[in-house]
Image: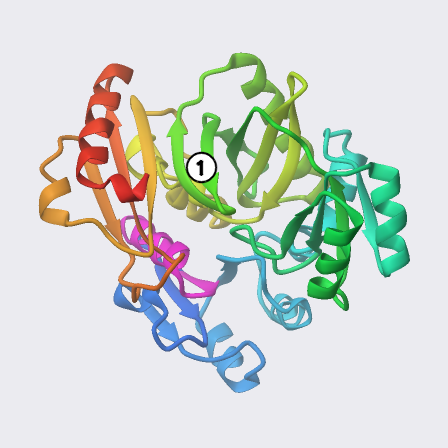
Amino acid sequence: MIIGILGGGQLARMLALAGYPLGLTILCIDQAIDACAREVTEVIHASLNDDAAVNHFLNQVDCVTIETENLPYELVEKIADKCQMLPNLDALRVTQDRLFEKELFSELTIPTAQYVKIDSWDDLVAGATQLQFPVLLKTRRSGYDGKGQVVIHNLIQAKSAWDLFGGSALILEKFIPFEFEVSIIAVRNLAGEMRFYSLVLNKHEKGILRISRAPFENELLQKQAEEYAKKVFIKLNYVGVMAIEFFYADEKLIGNEIAPRVHNTGHWTIEGAETSQFENHLRAITGLPLGSTKPRGFSIMINCIGREPDSKEILAIPGLHLHSYGKKAMPQRKLGHVTITANYQEELEERYQAFKKMCYHFI
């Protein structure tokens, strides 16, 4: 069976690596000549508006999935008319627009930040008055890794933000002074079977994920997150892996964003769970039974941003696993990740401290 992926970045790369033991072949389409999935699987280097290339791609695959929600909806709609796409178009439509996400949270009674749709400067002034400073002004689309958003504390900053984003579709949200951030990775297959990974505790800097720790053991919050994920799965008739990011504030989870794909906060599952998020995504969209999501001990995942550590040094640390994506080094670019695993929490902390001494600039 051949699975087509719209995109050829590191998520497609890790999906391809997970597909081989299942007897699956992965074919990607990505206009970037240096798309890093090319090192492990075939990539058609073309834009999605290249009809001939897209048809060539579709003629070879049995179903299509995505590695990013930031895709031209109209072009993906044409693809979905010709080939089964999982997750479906409705999931893509909702998750690539921050306003639609917030509306979905509200409809499903999942707590989320107060929000206002912004179409004009007057809307922004009225919205800031309604929500009260501080607020977050965000572009509705193409927001990831902290891009397309700014915190506003007064009308002077609001004017600067409007000058920066004006002309784009926008949403204004009440700023939430949260205690911590967690995410849940969940998966649903074609038969409707659902599985949930342990909650993950996440640390971001400048909007980019730096560190994830799993499992985050809180029975009440785990149950709450699973119930919210179930609601989204059923509403969207979702098939595949999905991530929901939450803030924790006022003694409850507050829905922030949904990712309709395998997710950075789930990379720990490659070594740290009985079945990785990548394998379970492929199982889900091909109609296979889902694998166990139980954690194997304790894990910390650290993103390598802008530079990579010396492999000879860090691989001497027991329980450390390096994943290099084969990408050219650039500031603020995710070049790889490191996962540290251990059977016990104390052992994990010892290994993490050893890593920090060698690679303090990654923490």
In the displayed structure, 221 sits above or below 156; it is: above
Q: Quadrant of residue 215?
A: top left
Check if residue 193 falls in the magenta segment: no
Q: Nearer the viewer, residue 204 or 321?
A: 204
Check if residue 21 falls in the magenta segment: yes
Q: Quadrant of residue 315?
A: top left
Q: Please name the residue shown 20% across and 49% down the image.
A: 309
Residue 281 shows in the view? yes
The span shown in magenta is: 2-22
Element type at mark 1: loop
Q: Please name the residue shown 73% across and 65% down the image.
A: 163
Looking at the image, the residue that sits furthest to the bottom is 52
Q: Is residue 57 left or right of residue 134?
A: left
Residue 57, given in percent of the width and then of the height, sits at 47, 75
Q: Is residue 124 left or right of residue 278?
A: right
Amino acid type at circle 1 is: Pro
Residue 292 shows in the view? no
Q: Kindly report the secondary structure that dominates the magenta region of the rendered protein.
A: helix
Q: Is residue 105 left or right of residue 210?
A: right
Residue 81, given in percent of the width and then of the height, sits at 66, 68
Q: Please name the residue shown 48% across and 75% down the image.
A: 59
Which residue has dot 1 on it?
289
